[in-house]
Image: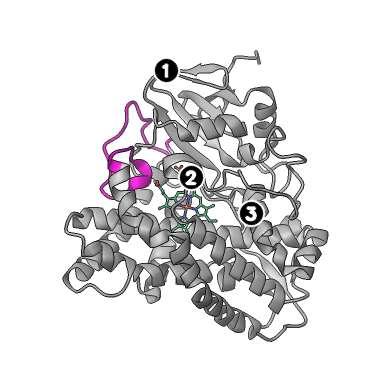
Amino acid sequence: MSATAPTPGLPTERDAGPFAPPRAISRMREARPVSPLRFPDGHEGWLVTGHEEARRLLADNRFSSRQDLGILHVPYETPGMPVPTAPSPQVPGLFIAMDPPDHTRLRRKLTGAFTVRRMRSLEAHLADLVERQLDALARLTPPVDLVAEFALPVPSLVICELLGVPYEDRGTFQANSARFMLKEVSLEEKMAAYGALTGYLAELVTRKRAAPGDDLLSDLARDGDLTVEELTGVAFLLLLAGHETTANMLGLGTFALLENPGQLAAVRADPELLPGAVEELLRYLSVADLFYRYATEDIELGGVTVPAGSTVVVSLLAADRDPRRFAEPDTLDLHRNARGHLAFGHGVHQCLGQQLARIEMRAALGGLLRRFPDLALAVPAAEVPLRTDMTVYGVHALPVTWTETARR
Ligand code: HEM
């Protein structure tokens, strides 16, 4: 292949181990941090893998985020999903897939609810919620699937409580959100899952508008400036973004620690290391990896001109493993300063829930390591089922075992 020929397809096979980017993606980053890419449907676009180039892309609003269904829209992986030829119409409330000023108007209504101070005030309550989950876990007889029994319930409980979504309804929303996150699902199935979830949420926000309670969705429902469709879109985005990502960080993060016993021992020995460890795990794993943008004009990026109309995919995982930004990037080093990683994105769309996610991860990982001092994998590492089929990476299940537990 010549130096300029587009690479066919987006490599997804984790052939360099469960935590590293696909080898082909790393090679592309070394050769050309902004590479042409041919998608399976024949459409040509660009893949950004360098840290500096990814940062620039995410900071530049000429790269539009407007796409049908935003995070659900993986045009080259969802059979039947049309390739965007222009910025798409917007789904009300789904501000992750909007550009300023529409994005700004909605995001502003939420920033107050997610400030560092607001999140800190939740910390004690969150620690208690985690301990109760750990009590339940300790009562089970190992081997146990840590994803089903801990990594998924903790963020689901937290986001339900924050938004005012009844946790008893999780069966519906977890199954439906898992369906959109599947890459190889048909457009019809994806839309059916989307319809079921937004139908449920539309009813919920309508009830909250009539009789608001003490939760985030009720606060938003009191704001007469927002339509029911917008409230539904916001609820959908927060519910989905609020549990899938953190759950996968907890599942895959625990797996990564168990596979790096020296690092695990270091964080067990010194709980002060935990905040830095969470930051490094975020960098090392970057579970929300691929994001799509659309060039609204010709834009210079990393020495190439990305022509107007191009679809641009950014790999945050590749960027966070860029040796030009992080020394020995493929080593999990809980003592390093991992700040500047792009696991939460960058620019106007940078993760709204990042402080919440950090607090959840510290409480959950810290509690898990303390209460289960000899936690171990219950199967060989090669048998842990990886989520290469999902848009947010992680593990489908993490069978673990232990012989002793510590008290609260
Ligand atoms: C946006 C990652 C947890 C809510 C993003 C983006 C990333 C990300 C990379 C940027 C998307 C883009 O540029 O298009 C993560 C990771 C998490 C996490 C790795 C867990 C470890 C959460 C939580 C919440 C949340 C707990 C909610 C409570 C959001 C929202 C956006 C967002 C609403 C859209 C922001 C905007 O468009 O302005 N997240 N996230 N995330 N995240 Fe998170």
The residue lying furthest to the right in this view is 262
Task: Report the magenta residues as a range.
Answer: 75-102
Task: Pick whichever, 85 or 298, lies toward us.
Answer: 298
Q: Is residue 217 above or below residue 82?
A: below
Give the mark nearest the N terminus, 1 or 2.
Answer: 2
Q: Amino acid at mark 2?
A: Glu
Q: Which image quadrant for residue 166?
A: bottom left
According to the image, label 1 marks what residue?
298
Q: Which residue is at 67% across, 32% downward?
A: 24
Q: Position of residue 184 (x, y in %)?
A: 48, 45
Q: Residues within 10 Å of mark 2 (few under 14, many from 20)?
A: some
Q: Residue at x 62, y 31 (%)?
A: 50
CB atoms of marks 3 and 2 within 8 Å = no
Can residue 389 be seen from the camera position used here? yes
Q: Residue 334 location in percent, x, y? A: 74, 55
Query: Is residue 49 visible in this depiction of the protein?
Result: no
Please name the predominant secondary structure of the magenta segment in the image: loop
Q: Is residue 190 above or below residue 321?
A: below
| Residue 279 circle label | 3
- Marker disc for residue 290: none
* Location of residue 207 in the rendering, given as x and y in whole percent from the top left corner: 21, 70
Relative side of 326 to 71, left or right: right
